[in-house]
Amino acid sequence: MKISFPTRGTILGRAESNAVSAVIESDASLTQGIWRKRFEEQFREHIGVRHAISVTSGTVALETALRLLDLRPGDQVIVTPQTFQATAQPLLDLPADVVFCDVEPDTLNMDPTALAGMISDRTAAVLLVHYGGLPARMHEIVPLAHRHGAVVIEDSAHALGALHRGRRPGALGDIGCFSFHGSKAITTLGEGGMLTFDRDDWAERLDRVRSNDTDYESLPYAGPQTTPPALLPWMRYADDVYRRTCTRVRRAGTNATMSEAAAAVGVVQLGRLPELTRRRREIAERLDDILAEFPDTTRPHRAAPGDVHAHHLYTFFVNDPAAREDVVRLLDHHEVEVQLRYFPLHLVPEWRARGHGPGECPVAERSWFDHQVNLPCHPGITDAELDYLTDTLRTCLRATTR
Ligand SMILES: *Cc1c(COP(=O)(O)O)cnc(C)c1O
């Protein structure tokens, strides 16, 4: 039996097929119908914010969120190094100074103490991840950031379904960014993303930026120096013809609108979220039970009482670095796929070329090079596969650790 990381992080079935069929069989617009609005409305309610704006990917959500800040040279952005490259990628061509803030060894979330040591009034934004679906210490991080006038951007790509002190990731900081990539908790047919926040002025601007920032207000036709063409009989909107055909753009924008079919699937998937999160939790608890037998391992950090972990990743630690190598090799030998997520971002060539390097975030570095192991944990795992996974984990740990 082979236990792999998911090609899909979710379950798709008849209800999703029906949703796509309904969009195809209706004569409604494929880009501006009821579904995108409905998905945004339900997502907004689920997260508990004033605005949810859908886009075409999590990466685009992060990029758009960062552009919203109008960063200037000298502005500093503090980022976690323990994340997928998309979190910090938009910063590669923005004028900000990027600083990586180390993580806590047990959660791999941004460490508020480390953050307190580097934040200043130059800090324009703090960009963090709820690593693996466990909420970061937002009750400490957000007030600290706000004291310095910094915006908190939550990369919540792992955290859909999680809860922190009664509120959802995506509503804890200033802007939440979600991904509906096929590997995530829910998907909008493979690609998709969402921004969540409260500010009305951001909503207005984002809604324009994601659709080419078209300007329908000001008319390019300026009077007698050009002659308007004769209106043809089919031009039903005669009064409006210049508005509708000669639009201008206000500033650089893009087209990042989610399609109706994708949003219709999103609505169905969001309805499944509780069931999907429950299955992830079940798998994580079974794996936790095995690790409890081995004192030389450290189980994933549990959510605080009242909080909810979304279990996007199952990350545990082998205390002895040499044993970690053995565990990984043996699991692989037994066809359990192991990943090490994520390689510390400040050590990739693009960030090294900007002066970052080893020693900057020692906790993240030690974790990746010496201790961490990621096991498959997703709703596509069957009961039989889960039995095989837990038995194999026990066998491999017995052979390599105490
Ligand atoms: C998946 C992911 C992204 C990117 O989302 P896409 O929709 O694939 O562009 C960003 N950050 C994190 C932490 C992710 O896991």
Image (cartoon, rainbow, N blue to C red):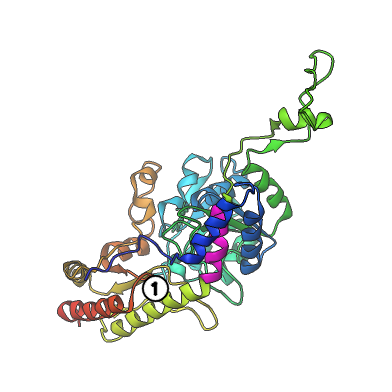
Q: Main secondary structure of the magenta part?
A: helix
Bounds of the magenta segment: 261-272
Q: Which residue is mark 1?
A: 106
Q: Is residue 309 above or below residue 265?
A: below
**How many labels sit on residues?**
1
Residue at the (56%, 74%) spot, across then down: 164
Q: Residues within 10 Å of mark 1 (few under 14, many from 20)?
A: some
- As drawn, which residue projects farthest toward the top? 225
Q: Nearer the viewer, residue 392 or 87?
A: 392
Q: Residue at x 64, y 65 (%)?
A: 42
Name the residue at 24% across, 78% down: 388
Please say whether residue 156 is visible from this viewpoint: no
* Residue 102 in sight in this render: yes
Residue 313 position (above or below residue 293): above
**Is 272 on the left or on the right of 344, as rendered?**
right
Q: Quadrant of residue 174?
A: bottom right
- Specify the amino acid type for callout 1: Asp
Task: Indicate the quadrant containing the C terminus: top left, top right, bottom left or bottom right.
Answer: bottom left
Residue 262: within the magenta?
A: yes
Q: Is 288 one of the magenta-colored residues?
A: no
> Horizontal and vertical percent for residue 393?
24, 77
Rendered location of residue 12, percent (x, y): 45, 64
Quadrant of the rendered image holding ligand 1: bottom left
Q: Disc 1, ligand 1: is the CB inside 8 Å?
A: no
The residue at 76%/28% (across/down) is 234
